[in-house]
Image: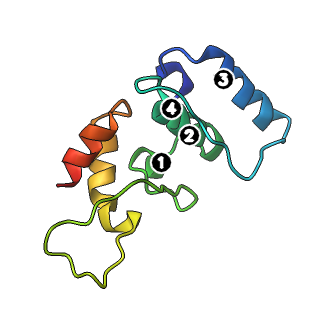
């Protein structure tokens, strides 16, 4: 995803690019905003900007791109198993392939 594909967020896009060009990137950036504001699209566009727009990034398989997201414990899962994001990585990639604009409810439904 490229910055041009992100709807709105012009000030934030400029600030992220400026931080990268000045080599002043913190170890983490939290993008916050209301539902539908494009936080995921902006995060993916920034990752693409930093890591290059190669084929590995298009499939979200770049070795330097990591995701952490909320997960559920499906019925029938052992109580000993602690669910982690990697347990739902396939579903996460499927959801992202459909587009970066989705709600938490859509994500929760996709996991089931």
The residue labelled by disc 1 is 57
Q: Nearer the viewer, residue 68 or 95?
A: 68
Spot occupied by residue 99 in the image (x, y as percentages of width and height) = 33, 33
Q: Which of the two labelled residues, at mark 2 and mark 1, occupies the earlier sequence position?
A: 2
- Disc 4 target residue: 39
Q: Residue furthest bottom?
A: 80
Residue 18 marker: none
Q: Earlier in the sequence, mark 2 or mark 4?
A: 4
Task: Tell me the residue at 53%/19% (across/down).
Answer: 4
Q: Are marks 4 and 1 in contact (CB under 8 Å)?
A: no
Above/below status of 21 relative to 25: above
Of residues 65 and 86, the one drawn nearer to the viewer in this rendering: 86
In the image: residue 43, left or right of residue 105? right
Disc 4 to disc 1, how far (Cα)?
18 Å
Q: Which mark is residue 12?
A: 3
* Residue 97 in view of the camera: no
- Kindly check if marks 2 and 1 are in contact, taking CB atoms under 8 A apart as contact: yes
The crowding category of the residue bearing disc 1, from other C-alpha atoms within 10 Å (few below 14, some 14 to 19, many at least 20), is: some
User: First in sequence: mark 4 or mark 1?
Assistant: 4
From the image, state whether disc 2 or disc 3 is nearer to you. Answer: 3
Residue at which label 2 appears: 48
112 relative to 80 in the view: left or right: left
Which residue is found at the position 34% from the left and 60% from the top?
89
């Amino acid at each position: 995803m490229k910055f041009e594909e992100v709807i709105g967020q012009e000030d934030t896009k400029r600030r992220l690019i400026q931080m990268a060009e000045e080599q002043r990137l913190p170890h983490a950036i939290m993008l916050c905003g209301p539902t539908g504001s494009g936080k995921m699209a902006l995060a993916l566009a920034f990752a693409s900007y930093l890591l290059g727009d190669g084929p590995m990034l298009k499939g979200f398989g770049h070795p330097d791109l990591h995701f952490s997201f909320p997960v559920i414990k499906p019925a029938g899962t052992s109580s000993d198993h602690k669910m982690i994001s990697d347990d739902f990585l396939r579903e996460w990639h499927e959801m992202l392939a459909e587009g970066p604009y989705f709600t938490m409810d859509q994500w929760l439904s996709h996991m089931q």
